[in-house]
């Protein structure tokens, strides 16, 4: 396999989130593309710097909510009006619209249920963090008190890996690891 | 930087006040006096609610040590500076009710709660009533002929006299208003003093008083709405009523705070407010509209479902006689904020917020209108120039007083332990 087909990944470890934020700013200003940052907690203001797009979770949540709303109304129309009209407390039993107030609480709850579960499952699926999925973070210490910045040479063809390492060191990285991944 | 009340704003507010005065004067000569009185109550209570909502949120932000809202404190102080003016309007209405100039609170009529009446006074303007048999007998011994008062006696109201009687009503009203004014003045004084001294002790005092106010307001917001609003429909009762009215106050207040801040920003003030503050205000309007709808619906659905005659009459009247404003105001107060403020970008967009703010401002006025009017006028209601004009007049008065109050201090506090955090608010 040729040397050029290999992807080299640089993992620069930081022990302070502000330091990392500054480093990211400076590196991006110098034209380095940062692939990702692994952190034990969300770092405010980092997303726009490293070019992470805004989450589309809100749209997903809306769609799940609408699904829940329609399913709940459809279900109750079928159970309570169409299939087996039920007379509860003398309330109109042959019309969905006239009986709507009684169905609103269930509809509301089912909307929330669908939106919440849908969001949680989508989030975990998209992040690859469903139970049983293999962990993708490069270093277990990023779940404790360290921060890792991931830079690949495939995204930065203009940079030498050694040069990049030097830059990261001068920005305050406490540890730099290189990994070679075989390009598939 | 201090706010300068521009001539343009002054003229607009005076034009609105003039429209209100015209509406009031033409109303006095053309429509029933009860319609004028009920409009005074509606507007007084609505703007009282806005000011109290601002005071509540102010206290809440102290008690929860909310940092982001620090830069908005002066705006809130401006809004709750209207409490005395609104209270004065309410007190005029209550004096009118006590003197029987208006019949908004029909439990104030002694005929409804007294079993006996002196025969010689029946045809007079103010007959002499006797609450119970003992009092009647005493009068008979003194040579008065006492007869049963059956035509107007109302047992349901008579059973409520332990709470609903005019002296106790006045005691409560004065306690509420005094408490609100004292707290409002104290918070304002504390805020101005903090600007001068920067004393952190003042911040912690605000924290304590804020928590104290929340406790007091938790009780007063409920009992106040029972006394001033729910007692109009004297037979009817709802334990959820206080929360419902309170949620309406709160959302109207957040709405006014947001619109007022946007106005100030558009005039080049409040540079310290960034889009994250605006976003948070948008979230409050969005969330509180849901809270309000939730409480509206909770009250409606339980009464609709159980269908108990003494409860359901309240909604039967509103649905049969006020169908369009009743459901209309519910829908606009719910649907408009929901649809227009759902996305993040909309909450950060001043145009969207002002559009929604205007609709919600009118929508919650209609809500207050629906709280009062059906109980006073039953099916004989009209919505015309008097209502719209007086609402505009009060809006003008509110704008005038609030903007005048804003000129008196810098628009952003100079000192607060949380000021720095608020200036860098970012979400």
Image: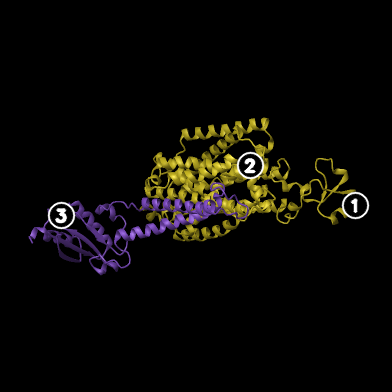
Chain colours: A purple, B yellow
How would you rate the neighbour count of disc 1 (Cα within 10 Å): few for under 14, some for 14-19, many for 20 or more?
some
Mark 1 — on which chain does it sit?
B
Dot 3: what SS?
A: loop
Residue ID for mark 3: A156
Residue ID for mark 1: B140
Mark 3 — on which chain does it sit?
A
Marks 1 and 3 close (CB-CB < 8 Å): no
Residue B126, compared with residue B215, is above or below; it is above
Residue ID for mark 2: B320
Horizontal side, residue A168 vs residue B191: left or right: left
Mark 1 to mark 2: distance in Å? 47 Å
Marks 3 and 2 close (CB-CB < 8 Å): no
Horizontal side, residue A85 vs residue B343: left or right: right
Give a yes or no on whether discs 1 and 3 share a subunit. no
> What numbered label is drawn on residue A52?
none
| Residue B267 place in picture, x, y as percent | 41, 39
In the image as oriented, which residue stretches furthest toward the left?
A: A2
Dot 2: what SS?
A: helix
How would you rate the neighbour count of disc 2 (Cα within 10 Å): few for under 14, some for 14-19, many for 20 or more?
few
Residue in front for this viewpoint, A50 or B194: A50
């Amino acid at each position: 396999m040729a040397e050029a087909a290999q992807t080299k990944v640089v993992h620069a470890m930081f022990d302070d989130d502000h330091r990392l934020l500054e480093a990211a700013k400076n590196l991006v200003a110098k034209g380095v593309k940062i692939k990702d940052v692994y952190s034990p907690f969300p770092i405010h203001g980092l997303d726009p710097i490293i070019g992470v797009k805004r989450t589309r979770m809100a749209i997903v949540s809306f769609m799940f909510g609408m699904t829940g709303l329609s399913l709940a109304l459809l279900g109750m129309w079928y159970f309570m009006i169409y299939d087996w009209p039920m007379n509860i407390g003398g309330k109109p039993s042959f019309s969905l619209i006239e009986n709507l107030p009684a169905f609103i609480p269930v509809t509301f709850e089912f909307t929330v249920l669908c939106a919440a579960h849908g969001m949680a499952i989508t989030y975990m699926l998209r992040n690859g963090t469903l139970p049983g999925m293999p962990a993708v973070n490069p270093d277990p210490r990023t779940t404790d008190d360290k921060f890792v910045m991931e830079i690949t040479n495939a995204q930065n063809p203009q940079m030498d890996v050694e040069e990049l390492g030097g830059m990261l060191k001068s920005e305050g990285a406490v540890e730099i690891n290189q990994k070679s991944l075989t390009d598939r | 930087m201090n706010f300068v009340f521009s001539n343009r704003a002054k003229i607009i507010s005076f034009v609105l006040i003039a429209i209100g005065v015209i509406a009031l004067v033409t109303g006095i000569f053309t429509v029933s006096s009860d319609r004028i009185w009920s409009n005074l109550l509606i507007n007084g209570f609505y703007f009282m609610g806005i000011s109290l909502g601002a005071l509540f949120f102010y206290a809440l932000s102290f008690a929860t040590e909310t940092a982001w809202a620090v830069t908005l404190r002066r705006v809130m102080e401006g809004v709750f500076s209207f409490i005395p003016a609104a209270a004065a309007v309410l007190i005029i209405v209550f004096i009118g009710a006590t003197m029987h100039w208006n019949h908004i609170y029909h439990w104030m009529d002694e005929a409804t709660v007294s079993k006996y009446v002196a025969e010689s006074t029946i045809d007079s303007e103010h007959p002499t009533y006797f609450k119970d048999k003992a009092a009647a007998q005493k009068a008979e011994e003194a040579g008065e002929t006492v007869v049963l008062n059956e035509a107007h006696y109302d047992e349901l109201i008579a059973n409520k006299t332990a709470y609903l009687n005019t002296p106790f009503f006045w005691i409560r009203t004065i306690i509420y208003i005094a408490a609100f004014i004292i707290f409002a003045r104290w918070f304002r004084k504390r805020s101005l003093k903090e600007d001068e001294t920067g004393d952190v002790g003042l911040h912690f005092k605000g924290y304590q008083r804020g928590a104290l106010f929340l406790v007091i307001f938790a009780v007063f917001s409920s009992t106040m709405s029972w006394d001033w609003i729910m007692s109009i429909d004297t037979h009817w009762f709802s334990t959820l009523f206080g929360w419902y009215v309170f949620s309406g106050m709160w959302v109207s207040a957040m709405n006014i705070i947001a619109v007022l801040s946007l106005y100030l920003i558009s005039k080049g003030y409040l540079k310290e407010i960034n889009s994250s503050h605006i976003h948070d205000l948008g979230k409050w309007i969005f969330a509180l509209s849901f809270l309000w709808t939730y409480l509206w619906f909770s009250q409606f659905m339980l009464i609709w479902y159980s269908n108990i005659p003494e409860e359901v009459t309240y909604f039967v009247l509103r649905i049969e006689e006020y169908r369009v404003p009743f459901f209309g105001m519910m829908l606009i107060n719910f649907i408009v904020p929901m649809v227009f403020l759902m996305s993040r970008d909309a909450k950060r967009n001043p145009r969207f917020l002002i559009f929604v703010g205007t609709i919600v401002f009118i929508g919650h006025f209609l809500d207050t209108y629906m709280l009062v009017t059906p109980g006073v006028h039953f099916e004989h209601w009209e919505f015309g120039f008097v209502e719209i004009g007086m609402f505009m007049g009060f809006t003008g008065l509110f704008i005038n007083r609030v903007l005048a109050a804003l000129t008196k201090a810098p628009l952003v506090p100079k000192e607060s332990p949380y000021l720095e955090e608020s200036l860098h608010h970012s979400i």
